[in-house]
Amino acid sequence: MASERGTLHATDDGRVAIRFVRLFAHPPEKVWRALTDPAQLAAWFPAIVDLSTPAGKELFFGVTERQRATYGMADDPERTPNGRMLRNEPPHLLEYEWMGEILSWELTGTADGCRLVFTNVLSDREVAGPAAAGWEAGLEVVSAQLDGVPVTWDPFVRAEELAREY
């Protein structure tokens, strides 16, 4: 499976940002659904969350069944918010904070479909490699979903393979 590496950049405030750029032969509206629809998110996103929330509202990122089974993780029974929607401008800009990280998804229509720029701003540079590997594996699933290709690989295993390369 081919991969498209994310790039690492320092931010002005001393943090680091992982950035991915993808071109899809699909309109922004279809890509937006792949990034926000709970059924599609379940195949690749590392949490359960309602991303239809308006800007300024708190978010709760829950633990997935895979995380429970594989890592023994558990949800906060109080469902204390652990994020906030910063911008939600369908189908072009989605930006939210999750446990101190900022995730930004920018979609721009092109003549052939859509350009996605995804940026994850992290406070801890040490987690940049594993985080980039996870996002790259997730974006591979998004691409397959958009193209109607069955996902025959395990995104968790794929992220572990990619982590060695980062």
Image (cartoon, grey):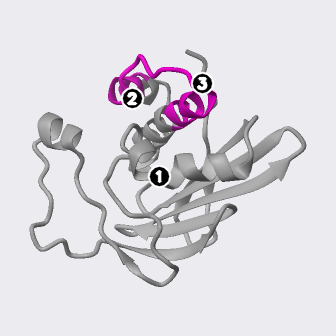
The amino acid beneath tag 2 is Pro
Magenta stretch, overall SS: helix
Q: Earlier in the sequence, mark 1 or mark 2?
A: 1
Q: Nearer the viewer, mark 1 or mark 2?
A: 1
State the residue in front, 165 or 142: 142
Which residue is disc 1 drawn over? 37
Give the quarter of the figure containing the N terminus: top right
The residues colored magenta run: 139-161
Q: Does the segment drawn in magenta span residue 151?
A: yes
Percent across and percent down for residue 54 are 50, 78
Residue 161 lies left or right of residue 136; in this view the side is left
Q: In the displayed structure, would residue 32 be above or below residue 78?
A: above
Q: Which residue lies at the image location 58% right of the left edge and 75% below the top edge?
A: 87
Q: Which residue lies at the image location 56% right of the left edge and 27% below the top edge?
A: 144
Q: Which residue lies at the image location 20% right of the left edge and 75% below the top edge?
A: 80
Q: CA distance from mark 3 to mark 2?
A: 13 Å
Q: Earlier in the sequence, mark 3 or mark 1?
A: 3
